[in-house]
């Protein structure tokens, strides 16, 4: 029985290899890259006078022709003023995960990306309310809230595209959707802004970003791809249909 099973497996393997040969296959050389870059949204927001302000850098390492390991790190500062209080928040964040390229390597060739990124995020920040003004029947009062430190955790999914515009220089953009796993502040002390995440009063946040990066090839990988079989003109497409010579 074992001999029969082993023989059947060998026959199936041979048939599979023959089918690949029949379909036709070829190889391409794909450059695997490593590099670093920066996100553009925060600097543009700072120039425009918007909050939060900060900076973000990105690191990349191509694990293979489809998967890129990535890490993003940055800091941000957030200030919100109302008629009777002032809120301040600042901190650092780190996101780690991978990008998966949905493009066929034959099309991507290490130069183009259209796919989805998955990240785990950690945010370390402090928040305080330097001034709170309120009034009641007995008069006006001024108080403040002490600074407190927190750690928040979140997940991020980001579909996006990227392209090499000239040698080793890439530009791209992504849409970011984030899920807050743990706010670190409790139910009644939600942060107005969590660095790297966004509005801490809601479980979800979204946004977009533009990226510039330099990615240098560190080695080349040879990738095998299967070429589709093209039917010749006038070839019968139905394998079950047979043509008889009778009557000719």
Image (spheres, helix red, strand yellow):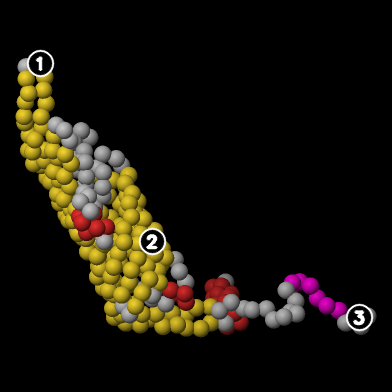
Q: Which residue is mark 1?
A: 137
* SS for callout 2: strand
Residue at 20%, 55% in the rendered image: 46
Residue wearing tag 3: 246
Q: Which residues are magenta?
A: 238-244
Q: Is residue 24 visible?
A: yes
Identify whether 72 is placed above or below 217. Answer: above
- Badge 3 marks a residue whose secondary structure is loop
- Foreground: 215 or 82? 82
Where residue 232 appears, as percent x and y from the top left, is 69, 81
Q: Quadrant of the C terminus?
A: bottom right
In the current view of this chain or complex, which residue is farthest to the top?
137
Q: Nearer the viewer, residue 37 or 62?
A: 37
Residue drawn at the location 45% of the way across and 82% of the way down? 28
Q: Which residue is mark 2?
A: 160
Density class for disc 2 (Cα within 10 Å; few <14, some 14-19, many ≥20) is many
């Amino acid at each position: 029985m074992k001999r029969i099973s082993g023989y059947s497996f060998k026959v199936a393997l041979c048939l599979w290899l023959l089918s690949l040969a029949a379909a036709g296959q070829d190889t391409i050389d794909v450059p695997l890259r490593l590099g670093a870059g920066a996100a553009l949204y925060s600097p543009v927001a700072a120039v425009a006078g918007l909050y939060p302000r900060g900076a973000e850098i990105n690191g990349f390492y191509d694990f293979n022709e489809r998967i890129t390991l990535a890490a993003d790190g940055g800091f941000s500062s957030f200030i919100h003023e109302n008629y009777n209080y002032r809120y301040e928040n600042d901190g650092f964040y780190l996101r780690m995960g991978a990008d998966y390229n949905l493009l066929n390597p034959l099309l991507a060739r290490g130069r183009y990306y259209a796919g989805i990124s998955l990240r785990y995020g950690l945010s370390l920040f402090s928040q305080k309310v330097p001034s709170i003004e309120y009034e009641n029947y007995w008069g006006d009062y001024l108080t403040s809230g002490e600074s407190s430190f927190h750690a928040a955790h979140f997940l991020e999914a980001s579909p996006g595209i990227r392209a090499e515009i000239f040698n080793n220089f890439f530009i791209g953009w992504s849409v970011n959707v984030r899920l807050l796993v743990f706010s670190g502040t409790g139910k009644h002390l939600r942060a107005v802004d969590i660095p790297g995440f966004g509005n801490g009063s809601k479980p979800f946040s979204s946004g977009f970003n533009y990226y510039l990066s330099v990615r240098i090839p560190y080695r080349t990988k040879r990738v095998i791809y299967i070429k589709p079989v093209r039917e010749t003109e006038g070839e019968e497409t139905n394998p079950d249909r047979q043509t008889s010579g009778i009557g000719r």
